[in-house]
Amino acid sequence: MKLATLRNGTRDGALVVVRRDGTRYAPATEIAPTLQRALDEWDAVEPALRAVADRLEHDQIESRPLDVAQLRAPLPRAYEWVDGSAYINHIVLVRKARGAQPPATLETDPLVYQGGSSDFLGPTDDIPLADVAWGCDFESEVCVILGDTPQGTTMEEAARHVRLLMLANDVTLRNLVPDELAKGFGFFGSKPATAFSPFAITPDELGDAWKDGRVHLRLRTWLDGRLVGDPEAGPEMHFSFYDLIAHVTKTRAFGAGTILGSGTVSNADPARGISCLAERRMREILDTGAPSTPFLTYGNRVEIEMSDASGRSLFGRIAQTVVPFEKRSDTRRTKV
Amino acid sequence: MKLATLRNGTRDGALVVVRRDGTRYAPATEIAPTLQRALDEWDAVEPALRAVADRLEHDQIESRPLDVAQLRAPLPRAYEWVDGSAYINHIVLVRKARGAQPPATLETDPLVYQGGSSDFLGPTDDIPLADVAWGCDFESEVCVILGDTPQGTTMEEAARHVRLLMLANDVTLRNLVPDELAKGFGFFGSKPATAFSPFAITPDELGDAWKDGRVHLRLRTWLDGRLVGDPEAGPEMHFSFYDLIAHVTKTRAFGAGTILGSGTVSNADPARGISCLAERRMREILDTGAPSTPFLTYGNRVEIEMSDASGRSLFGRIAQTVVPFEKRSDTRRTKV
């Protein structure tokens, strides 16, 4: 089942069920007004949502054409956004890029950070950038949305807490990272609002491609219309989502609607391209001594999508343009 | 006005208005079902909530006796929990304690970290601790709850975004901190669920004690019934809440209900005692070469409270006991 959140002038938008081909939707607000509410009461509402999805697939329910530009992030705000860094190739390359060593426990102890989660970007929202000198970069990722996940969840128990999957563009301000990490408290300002894919889908939509807590498909990224990366998201995800769930629940519980990210999808084979500019810049430094690829500037367009074996888009496409940030007094983007 | 959240078997509890003396309450669910909803629609609901508070104060409305044990955290879950470290004395002492240097930008660039926010502890909830070897510590703090706060908010604009204040016990697992910070991504597992005070209060409740984005009152902490600290929360807060707001909004916006903490309240004068055990242990190391104060263990009781000049408790009292963690299958504490 594919779920999405339609812009309706409220903070959390309106829950809709989307047809598998992504072109039509049926309202689901009578079952649950918002995706957060559906997650809060998942066991109670999932059967009714699946029934709508089934009727939608067989054209047995009134549906409307879907305009992706009217979609917010599936969760326009969430109670928790935890992002891992599960692709070791990315960690090694990016740390080289800033002259830092990978941690000694690289292969045994996952890296995760806690991101801001009160104000996400929708799949086609512009990326507002106040200063191009901050070094704006995209990071193409796969995410899961969790149901209630208790403290002490094991890898074996983890699967049952995964409710939905999404894609993310974890926008990063590279030039703010070194000073921030030097302070010792991790990322904060260097991680502005994250964007999510149009659709959040249940794991069964992935069929055999969802295996061992990994998505075994290629994640494609385009920059200004040109394909820049199509890495395999499965085999090189060193820590699976189940590993990450066991890791993050060591000392606390997570409430329904927690988003957990994979980190930048990255393959060791350079032919698979990039899911962030920092990796390309690092390869340029290794090849020529200096980076030649600039970070993002105004007008650059980033698109991120994942398709199944038959070429059908699973999550819809993230498609964002970098624009100058305009300060607005008390009015926030999410208030339509 | 004092607001609180009553346990009612739901994830977010029921909003109530509390009499200034903290002994009685009136339901507010007809105005806003939850505190988050009130914050979402603050301008619309504040007058009605203040009218209830006024009638409650003058005994002109039906009220019920308040049992603090029935209170959840004012926000049982929040979209964002950002904790600063605004008392420089604390940073210097704690870094000495783990043999680390304070950052070079100690006095010019605030330290903040992003905490987990999907599953807070209530003011009298036990602190579940899976392993005493993790080095469990309390941290007594002052917090503000923000309304919508745009990217690029200045210090001058910050005041208008502060809706409420609370106290927090930012529980920290000290012995997990060094390995975690060594990985470079900041705190995660070393910061389990945070607890908040019974009441969230509007800034006007503080009168003259709320000045320049600081609370000019003493924050008292008791361990097993013995007063261990009563530092002044005002003068040594190097970065005010307004400084912290300007700092955190540099690259992104924050939605209504974001909680922003001061960090451990700490005075340079040792006579003012401690708001966390790590500081006492550091002083012991400096005096005798080794710490003699153990971290918290099962049965230890931590209480945190702040009173106004007349001795009246402003936020009610956080009163928590450390207990062994018991894993429960899918049932979480917040589901009653």
Image (cartoon, coloured by chain):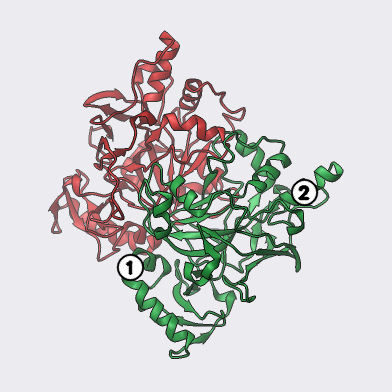
Chain colours: A green, B red
Res. A94 mark: none
Determine whether the residue tagged by mark 1 lies in a helix, strand or loop.
helix
> What chain letter is assigned to the residue under label 2?
A
Residue B178, horizontal then vertical, whole percent:
50, 29
In the rendered structure, the answer to whether residue B51 lies left or right of residue A182 reads left
Res. A43 mark: 1
Q: Nearer the viewer, residue B287 or A63?
A: A63
The amino acid type found where label 1 is placed reads Asp
Determine whether the residue tagged by mark 2 lies in a helix, strand or loop.
helix
Number of numbered discs visible in the structure rendering: 2
Q: CA distance from mark 1 to mark 2?
A: 46 Å
The amino acid type found where label 2 is placed reads Arg
Residue B273, horizontal then vertical, whole percent:
34, 21
In the rendered structure, the answer to whether residue A76 lies left or right of residue A169 reads left
Which residue is at 47% across, 53% downward?
A: A242
Identify whether A109 is placed above or below B24: above
Residue A272, horizontal then vertical, whole percent:
73, 58
Q: Nearer the viewer, residue A157 or B186?
A: A157
Which residue is at 39% across, 19% downward?
A: B281
> What chain letter is assigned to the residue under label 1?
A
| Crowding at mark 2 (Cα within 10 Å: few <14, some 14-19, many 20+) | many
Q: Nearer the viewer, residue A71 or A240?
A: A240
Most extreme residue toward the top, as rendered? Answer: B288
Quarter of the image for residue B330 reads bottom left
Which residue is at 52% across, 49% downward?
A: B157
Which residue is at 49% across, 23% downward?
A: B98
| Crowding at mark 1 (Cα within 10 Å: few <14, some 14-19, many 20+) | few
Can residue A196 be seen from the camera position used here?
yes
Q: Which residue is mark 2?
A: A281
